[in-house]
Image: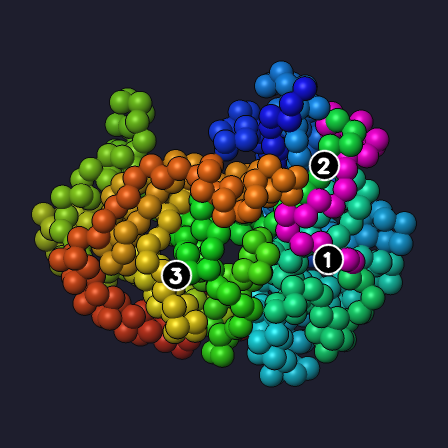
């Protein structure tokens, strides 16, 4: 019997899934279950992770995809895992889970304020070493446990991430990998391993950090209990995976230094691969370890573009939703068709939602549409819709410029993936704004594919991660920039940055509400 398949197990924010691929990267089967993260009523903003029930769901997915595809589990050459980043699991000395929270957990605002009060310069110091601020990392959450649940804090023997937890449940071996581990803010970026001195500076324990295993290495095999739980064959090799965004970057083919990808979903991410773990002196942009060994990533996050689009569709485009239902199509297709008729720049109208990232002082102005006239021929709901598309692309341009300022480098092309890349209009606008070719891959939700690539690399099916990506990643379409439109957008971009700064100042003065701001800012 030959090993013909690779499996990815993906613990996302809203669901868990098991995805089976053949060795050429074709998806053979997928079983997915949604999960919820319950708020502890005692702690507003908390999002607890139910490790007992959620492991059962993960096992149902693995068993389900094996049953659905009717394969022999022994045909699976290797398994790897990926997950939402920033969620953490704590273990006791016997290896039992004792506390866990999802990445959307927001209970530690008070602790961020305490950390800043303890030492106003410490966050910057930690960022320069780790690439992370308090906004997303594990430090405030661990500090919260120390303050609010001291009985749990005393029992902690190890801290890990959800992709490592999945491997632990399958193999009995616990180790953290650099791509997701680095998002804790307790890693030395350049060394790709824990830096306990960071925890010490925050008054936290330094004896809770497990071994580090590099992405793409074989950590062990499915043990007897793992096999009984999941339906996988005992002895199946398990390969260290990575964080969802880093594996998504692999899954769209951005594996080498100098390559970049934009992921357009509820949030938009600009990912740029670099050759070292140097950070931004201005502390404006996140830096993570890539899931490719000896590669790092600058990551700039845009808040809520996909959610803004959904809000606009549901709030203002009921007619398109009704027509789409009658015609059996997507309402966005109807909206795009009309928005295509509007010239680049939306007649000078622009909007403000997410700002260009400033990681050390991360806040966003009140949502705003501005510079429109009372002319229904020019300024109708499709103009407003196009302005949202253009605004998000301008934001991606701001992130590319920000990373270029920090690194001295910019990409020659952009790979565009995620749900937004299904829109040809949005893809073209992105190319026009960036002034670069935009490539859209066939597989747009590529996180699981990235995990499968690592699984195959780990057991020697692929010689290298870039070689594997070249074999399995296929490009559906390339959008070349219209340089006349690019000129229009560059003029608009300069104005938009100034307009946004003015809108942010209104929020700073308390005259308008922030769309979002980081804890403690």
The verdict on residue 223 being magenta is yes
**What whole-number distance in Å separates the C-alpha atoms at marks 3 and 2?**
43 Å
Q: In which quarter of the image is residue 118?
A: bottom right
Residue 101 percent across, percent down from the top left: 69, 52
Residue 130 percent across, percent down from the top left: 61, 70
**Mark 1, secondary structure of its residue:** loop
**Mark 3, secondary structure of its residue:** loop
Residue 185 percent across, percent down from the top left: 64, 66
Residue 212 got which mark? Answer: 1
Q: In which quarter of the image is the N terminus?
A: top right
**Mark 2, secondary structure of its residue:** strand
Circle nearer the N terminus (3, 2): 2
Q: Is residue 190 left or right of residue 281?
A: right
Residue 237 got which mark? Answer: 2
- The residue segment tinted magenta is 210-232
Residue under pointer 3? 354
Q: In this view, does 236 lie to the left or right of 254?
A: right
At x 16%, y 63%, the residue is: 487
**What whole-number distance in Å separates the C-alpha atoms at marks 1 and 2?**
18 Å
Specify whether residue 304 is in view: no
């Amino acid at each position: 019997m030959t090993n013909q398949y690779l499996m990815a197990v993906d613990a996302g924010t809203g669901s868990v899934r098991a995805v089976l691929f053949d060795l050429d990267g074709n998806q053979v089967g997928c079983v997915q279950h949604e999960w919820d993260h319950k708020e502890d009523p005692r702690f507003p903003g908390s999002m607890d992770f139910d490790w007992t029930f959620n492991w059962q769901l993960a096992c149902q997915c693995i068993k389900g995809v094996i049953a659905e595809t009717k394969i022999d589990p022994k045909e699976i050459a290797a398994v790897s895992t990926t997950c939402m980043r920033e969620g953490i699991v704590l273990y006791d000395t016997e290896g039992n889970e004792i506390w866990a929270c999802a990445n959307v957990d927001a209970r530690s605002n008070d602790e961020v304020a305490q950390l800043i009060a303890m030492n106003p310069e410490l966050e910057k110091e930690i960022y320069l070493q780790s690439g992370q601020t308090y906004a997303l990392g594990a430090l405030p959450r661990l500090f919260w446990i120390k303050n609010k649940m001291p009985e749990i804090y005393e029992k902690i023997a190890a801290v890990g991430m959800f992709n490592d937890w999945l491997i632990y449940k399958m193999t009995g071996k616990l180790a953290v990998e650099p791509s997701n581990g680095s998002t804790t803010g307790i890693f030395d970026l350049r060394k790709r391993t824990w830096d306990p001195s960071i925890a010490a500076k925050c008054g936290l324990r330094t004896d809770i950090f497990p071994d580090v295993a590099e992405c793409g290495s074989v950590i062990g095999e499915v043990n007897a209990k793992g096999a009984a739980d999941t339906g996988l064959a005992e002895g199946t090799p398990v390969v260290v995976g990575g964080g969802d965004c880093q594996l998504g970057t692999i899954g769209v083919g951005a594996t080498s230094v100098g390559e970049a990808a934009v992921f357009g979903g509820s949030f938009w991410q600009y990912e740029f691969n670099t050759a070292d773990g140097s950070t931004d002196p201005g502390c404006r942009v996140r830096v993570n370890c890539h899931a490719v060994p000896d590669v790092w990533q600058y990551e700039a996050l845009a808040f809520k573009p996909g959610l803004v689009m959904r809000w606009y569709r549901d709030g203002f485009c009921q007619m398109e939703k009704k027509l789409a239902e009658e015609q059996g199509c997507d309402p966005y297709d109807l909206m795009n068709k009309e928005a295509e008729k509007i010239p680049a720049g939306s007649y000078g109208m622009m909007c403000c939602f997410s700002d260009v990232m400033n990681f050390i002082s991360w806040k966003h102005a009140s949502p705003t549409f501005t510079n429109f006239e009372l002319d229904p021929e020019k300024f109708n709901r499709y103009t407003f819709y196009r302005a949202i598309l253009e605004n998000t692309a301008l934001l991606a341009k701001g992130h590319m410029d920000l990373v270029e300022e920090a690194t001295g480098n910019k990409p020659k092309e952009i790979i565009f993936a995620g749900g937004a890349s299904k829109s040809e209009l949005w893809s073209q606008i992105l190319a026009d704004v960036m002034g670069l070719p935009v490539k859209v891959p066939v597989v747009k939700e590529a996180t699981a594919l990235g995990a499968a690539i690592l699984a195959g690399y780990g057991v020697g099916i692929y010689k290298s991660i870039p070689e594997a990506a070249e074999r399995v990643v296929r490009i559906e379409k390339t959008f070349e920039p219209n340089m006349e439109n690019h000129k229009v957008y560059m003029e608009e971009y300069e104005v938009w940055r100034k307009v946004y700064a003015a809108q942010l100042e209104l929020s700073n003065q308390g005259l308008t509400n922030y769309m979002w701001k980081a804890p403690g800012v």
